[in-house]
Amino acid sequence: MEHELSLVHVLPRMVWTASPNGHAECAGAGWLDFTGLAPEAAAGDGWRCAVHSDDIGALLGVWRATVDSGSPGEIGARMRRNDGTYHRFLLRLCPLTDTTGAVVRLCILHSLIPDRSTAATRADECGLDTNIEDIKRADADLRAHRLAAERAQADSVLIAREAELRRANQYLSIAQRLSHTGSYSRDVATDKQTLSEEMYRICEFDPKEPVTHEMVLNRIHPEDLEMFKEMQRRALASGSDFDMTYRMVMPSGAVKHLRSSSQRLTELPDRLVYVGATQDITQWKLAEAALRSNEAELRRANDDLLRAYRHIAEAQRLSNTGSFTLDFSKNDLYWSEELYRIFELDPSTTITLDLVKGMVHPEDVPAYLAAVEGAAAGLTIDFAYRIVTNGHIKHLRAVGHRIEHAGDRPMFVGAVQDVTESRLAENALRQGEALLTQAEAVSETGSFLWDLESGDIRWSDELYRIFEFEPHSLITLARIAGSVHPDDRSAMEEMIGRAHAGLDSEYFHRICLSGGSVRYLHFVARSFRDEAGQLRYLGTVQNITERTLAEEAFDRVRSELAHAARAMSLGVLTASIAHEVNQPLTSLVTNAGTCIRVLKGPEPDVQLALTMAQRTIRDANRASDVIRRLRAMFSRKRAATEEVDLNEATREVLALSGSTLQSARIVIRARLDEDLPKIRGDRVQLQQVILNLVLNATDAMRSVNDRRRHLTIVTSRGGRREVSLSVRDSGTGVESGNVERLFDAFYTTKSEGMGIGLSISRSIIQGHAGRLWAAPNGDGPGATFTFSIPCDLAASNTEDAKEV
């Protein structure tokens, strides 16, 4: 804009500029010379004295219309010359606008040259005052000079005019170069175009070559070409002025942004001749783009800042942490929104150190004051304290440090976290740990954690006590193995292997203490991986010495009772035993006698004697088997684990008790599954259970006389991996409320019973990892007793083998 105002001073025309409100800003030398006014006299509203009083009203009306519309305006007016005479001018007012389109300045130009095609100015920047009287005198002078061209005075006048014109062109060229604005004219009919020097430079045409309209079109950016053609087509069709902004592609490939304003010369009504100005606005466009980019970046930065603030606020809310700043010089304390929430204060409350002190728990006030003094001295603080809000106590932790602010004014920034929940959780954890320690001591159960990656083993206090190791001393596998009973070290090695394989473990083992005593321990451990993927082993070790010794004593008593029960059953089975033994003995005597008679005959029949001898051997073996089974059933013999065919064991029991069942008039129905898999267990103990169930069923039906006495034995698969045996009778039955009491020790429904048979039977079945239960028959009288045992039951632990 400074270049434009300077241009007003140097132009040899009547040019002046004014603000939209009508105050003159700058007047050219030509205008000042014509009016005879000094610059300070013309400033403001002073220019009005140079306009005829009758014309000032109309001029101001056009002035306001131009400012309101932003379009150039024209009006004729009389202006006073410095000699006091008035001359009529054609005043053309053109508005200057900013980037928003608002009018910021009006410019008026007076030209002594009637040829307006060479006196181009920017259509959007200048206005034109044409001295009509001068035009007429110039025309008369020109005619006179043509008639008297020979005269030297006319020559000197023409030379002066040409010099003045050259000077004007020079000034115009400088103005165009400074404003990056070129002028042009175009005769549409002949396509003759005249370009100013600046126009050649802007469009980068060769000044030595004539420029055609086709050459201009070839430079238009392809994306703007159709718009450019369409606007020119409409303007040429109507003969109207046009103003457009477009891009032009230079030979180097660079793109320039141009703005062209064209106006038809109305002095030539029969021809379409346009004059105009083109301004290179590339830098403006780039500046606008940069401004838009900066605005976009600023908006993004503001958005990022807002998001960051929201994220910080959300993070503070989630972590129950508020922030603060403290200016000690002004005692100015700023709190974040979350800190107001923690202290349960209204956000409009003015925060002071005394206000906070009043909320601190009385016991923590000294610590609070010490922290404030330390902060004022520039120390970093980190302390915990309590506050009382609405009758509730909150546990807080405050941290902060000093920073240097403007003017080296000390500022203290920090954060306060509500740790009430974590503090309560810590207290609960400590209480839980104390209870766990007490519980471990009461139950004599210790816990451990084994890091298999590092080998580190951590023990609880109770586990140190169980092993009688020095508390908190280093624990290693070798040290543990040194305490394990020699017979149980293989089990420990197996546990170590399972641990490294990531498998759980459970086993029983013994340890030898320094005094020579032995403790029985129950070990249970589970493997897992921590957050870092490290393999860990967590487990418990319980001292079960007293329980184990008690169980051993109980098992001995139970074994004695079982033997007593079998001895009691001996009297019941005496008749059956006699029958079973007498039958093979009778056969033995008969077969032996027959063999002797055959051999003593006159003609001994050797073949028949051989047959009788074989029968004798068979019957002797049969009698031997009966005696063997009876001895096994009623002798003290340790349990032996073997594969047992439950069907075969059942048949042997039925064979032994056959006479008893016959004498009781009991009909036996045996439905034995021939595809029944074998089980592992103690054959004699299982037969004892079957025999006890059969004898109980027999006793339950002795008093039944109104119906047949049926005893049904069924074997079947109880599932994919278990077999079951049931004994069903049609006796007096059992009450559903007393079913479980039948298995209690010394509970009996018989007047002569001891009440230990079913209790021992259930213990035997449970020792085989099975179940024994009873239920009333739903479809008739009587009851059914059933037991089931897993098919793949492993051999019983030798420690569980008891005398029977």
Image (tube, rainbow, N blue to C red):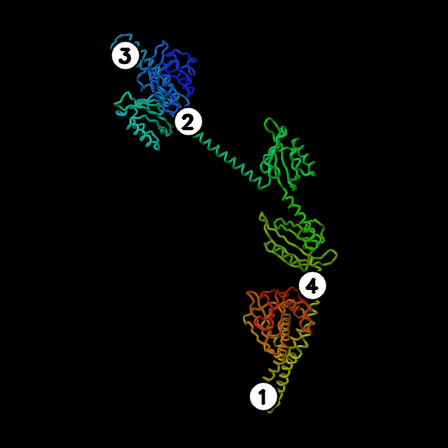
Amino acid type at mark 2:
Thr
- Residue picked out by circle 3: 140
> Mark 1: which secondary structure?
loop
Assess disc 4: are there few (<14), some (14-19) or many (≥20) residues with their C-alpha within 10 Å of its C-alpha.
some
How far apart are labels 1 and 4 at the CA level? 65 Å
- Whether tag 3 and tag 1 are in contact, CB under 8 A, the answer is no
Amino acid type at mark 3:
Ala
- Residue picked out by circle 1: 605
The mark that comes first in sequence, 3 or 1, is 3
Tell me which residue sits at (40%, 12%) in the image: 37
- Residue picked out by circle 4: 551
The mark that comes first in sequence, 4 or 2, is 2
The mark that comes first in sequence, 3 or 4, is 3
Quarter in which the C terminus is drawn? bottom right
How far apart are labels 3 and 4 at the CA level? 147 Å
The residue nearer to you, when weighing 453 against 682, is 682
Amino acid type at mark 4:
Glu
> Mark 3: which secondary structure?
helix
- Whether tag 1 and tag 4 are in contact, CB under 8 A, the answer is no
